[in-house]
Image (cartoon, rainbow, N blue to C red):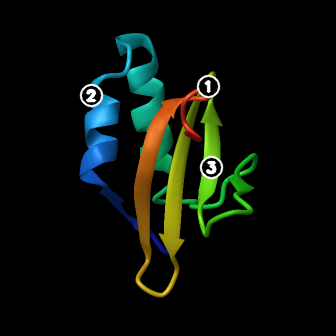
Amino acid sequence: MVSYSIEIKKSASKEIEKLPKLVLKRILSKIQSLSAEPRPHGCKKLTADEKYRVRVGGYRILYRIEDDKLIVYIVKVGHRKKIYD
């Protein structure tokens, strides 16, 4: 089974640091699971960009996949009300 590497954009890393502790563990677990399956059940491809989003409760993780390099780039993490601004 092929494993993707995870790279987190600097701005997304700062967003992750600001998350509430209760949600942080679930978000990090979901990000880690993207290395095994970058297109899990429930992920959606965004129409405007070449990005995907995955839900974790009321929060969203936006990411880009480069299949040729086997890399998942975490672009943005935040609450669903503010993520698409």
Q: Residue at x 63, y 44 (%)?
A: 54
* Side of 10 where 65 appears, left or right: right
* Quarter the C terminus occupies: top right
4, above or below 12, in the image:
below
Residue wearing tag 3: 53
Of mark 2 and mark 1, the one earlier in the sequence is: 2
Q: Position of residue 78 (x, y in %)?
A: 48, 31
Q: What residue type is labelled 1?
A: Lys
Q: Residue at x 51, y 56 (%)?
A: 63
24, above or below 65, in the image:
above
| Neighbourhood count class around disc 3 (C-alpha, 10 Å): few under 14, some 14–19, many 20 upward | many
* Side of 31 where 14 appears, left or right: left
Please say if the residues under marks 1 and 3 sit with CB atoms less than 8 Å apart: no
What numbered label is drawn on residue 17?
A: 2
| Neighbourhood count class around disc 2 (C-alpha, 10 Å): few under 14, some 14–19, many 20 upward | few
Q: How many marks?
A: 3
Q: Which residue is drawn at 44% across and 64% down?
A: 72
Mark 2 vs mark 1, CA separation in Å = 18 Å
Secondary structure under the numbered disc 3 in the rendered image: strand
Q: Position of residue 48 (x, y in %)?
A: 69, 63
What numbered label is drawn on residue 81?
A: 1
Mark 1 vs mark 3, CA separation in Å = 14 Å
Mark 3 vs mark 2, CA separation in Å = 19 Å
Of mark 3 and mark 2, the one earlier in the sequence is: 2
* Side of 13 where 32 appears, left or right: right
**Rendered image quadrant of residue 35:** bottom left
